[in-house]
Image: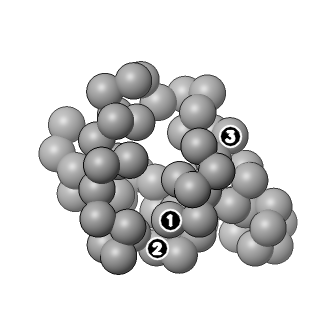
């Protein structure tokens, strides 16, 4: 899967959790990626440039 598509998916997840507040959205995004993304997807997004990701997604990846 292309890394641009993974960024888009991760941003969608983060937007869905945004109403929870910043800290909870970060935690929920990290939890979702950990539980539901396959190892190849996780490896790709973790290797991506964090500056290209939304702040919420970047923070969530730091928790993984």
The x and y percentages for residue 22 are 75, 73
Query: Which of the pair 43/7 is nearer the observer?
Result: 43
The circle drawn on residue 31 is 3
Q: Which residue is mark 1?
A: 58
For the image, the number of numbered tags is 3
Would you identify the image quadrant in which residue 52 lies? bottom left
| Residue at the extreme left | 2
> Which residue lies at the image location 59% right of the left edge and 43% below the top edge?
64
> Which residue lies at the image location 52% right of the left edge and 62% below the top edge?
57
Residue 45 visible in this rendered orientation of the protein: yes
Which one is earlier in the sequence, the residue at label 3 or at label 1?
Answer: 3
Q: Which residue is mark 2?
A: 54
How far, Cα to Cα, is label 3 from label 1?
13 Å
Secondary structure, mark 3, is: helix
Would you identify the image quadrant in which residue 15 lies? bottom right
Q: Are marks 2 and 3 in contact (CB under 8 Å)?
A: no
Q: Are marks 3 and 1 in contact (CB under 8 Å)?
A: no
The x and y percentages for residue 61 are 53, 53
Q: Are marks 1 and 2 in contact (CB under 8 Å)?
A: yes
């Amino acid at each position: 899967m292309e890394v641009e598509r993974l960024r888009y998916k991760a941003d969608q997840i983060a937007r869905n959790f945004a109403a929870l507040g910043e800290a909870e959205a970060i935690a929920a995004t990290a939890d979702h990626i950990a539980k539901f993304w396959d190892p190849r997807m996780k490896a790709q997004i973790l290797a991506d440039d964090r500056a290209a990701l939304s702040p919420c997604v970047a923070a969530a990846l730091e928790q993984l």
